[in-house]
Image (cartoon, grey):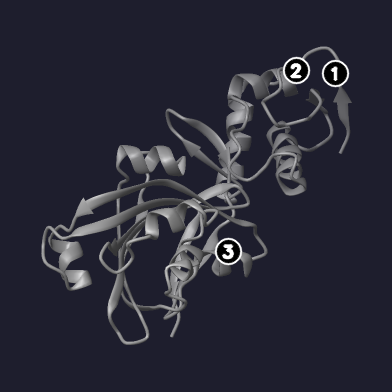
Amino acid sequence: MTLVRNDRAAPQHAGADVASAAVARRTGVTLWRQIEAVLAGELASGAIKPGQKLPTEQQLSARFRVNRHTVRRAMEELERRGLIRIEHGRGTFAADWVIDYALSPRTRFSEIIARQNREPTGRILRVSEVPADDAAAKALAVRRGVLLWKVDRLGCADGRPVSFTRHHFPRSRFPGLADAVSNSRGSITRALADCGLTEYFRRFSRISARLPSAEEAEVLDHPCNHAVLVTEAVNVDAEGVPVEYGLATYPAGRVQISVEF
């Protein structure tokens, strides 16, 4: 395909190091098909990264020197192919890769992400003491109002947020957990090991879907009008004693949840 270079113009979108170009006319290939092919190539090559916001229709019209209707037709086809997503009021974004998050008796965030050849990282957002509400008290087999540690953690894959988890632990069992968490580099498993719990297992998981809260949407960089997946889980020690009650939120466009037996 022949493209005519234009070295003068081109507003560029952040992160997309591409030259301005006009599509070739009278080639037998429709203009919107040429634009679709160029953008699909940039998506495939990584010039446009997963999740990155694309230039506006106006910017693309200027880049390719066509009208906005032609650009819109190309974008509709890219969306149909699943290469981009169009969010009204927010813009157009390159499609994200999807993490297959497998729940199993031994569910570990870092191991799940690493198995998919992505770099797992975690960041502790806050550690606080909270009284056990009805759900946490039932899950941990403690009295309502008993003090728990609550650890809010953001989990990322290749730097992209994929989970926002609120972990609840009995304070009486893990009195030094706050200090252990601060030294864990974002790893809950490492913090628990430092407190003497080297192994624990998933006893129960419940999966649901809903719209995110304002905090979840902000932390996960996720549209507030797009669904999130939610898991409610209980982990136990080797003797079957509950040690953790967790509520995790996942952006549905980036994560799919499966169950392993």
Q: Residue at label 2? A: 10
- Badge 3 marks a residue whose secondary structure is helix
- Residue at 26% of width from left, 51% of height from top? 129
Quadrant the N terminus occupies = top right
Report, in whole angstroms, how far the alpha carbon at label 3 lies from the one at label 2: 38 Å
**Residue drawn 71% across and 38% down?**
39
Using the image, determine if residue 148 lies above or below residue 206. above
Task: Find residue 102 and report its horizontal and vertical position in percent.
Answer: 48, 72
Specify few, some or many for label 1: CA neighbours under 10 Å numbering under 14, 14-19, or 20 or more: some
Dot 3 crowding, Cα within 10 Å, few <14, some 14–19, many 20+? many
Residue behind mark 3: 113
Q: Nearer the viewer, mark 2 or mark 1?
A: 2
**Marks 1/3: CA distance?**
42 Å
Residue type at numbered disc 3: Ile
Give neighbour class at mark 2: few <14, some 14-19, many 20+ (Cα, 10 Å).
Answer: some
Does residue 108 appear left or right of residue 47 in this picture? left
For label 1, the SS is loop
- Say whether marks 2 and 1 touch (CB < 8 Å): yes
Per the image, the residue denoted by label 1 is 6
The one nearer the camera, 237 or 206, is 237
- Separation (CA) of disc 2 from disc 1: 8 Å
Callout 1 amino acid = Asn
Mark 3 or 2, which is nearer the eye?
Answer: 3
Label 2: which secondary element = loop
Q: Residue at x 87, y 23 (%)?
A: 5
Tags 1 and 3 touching, CB below 8 Å: no
- Foreground pick, 176 / 141: 176
Please identify the quarter of the rendering in which residue 185 is found. bottom right
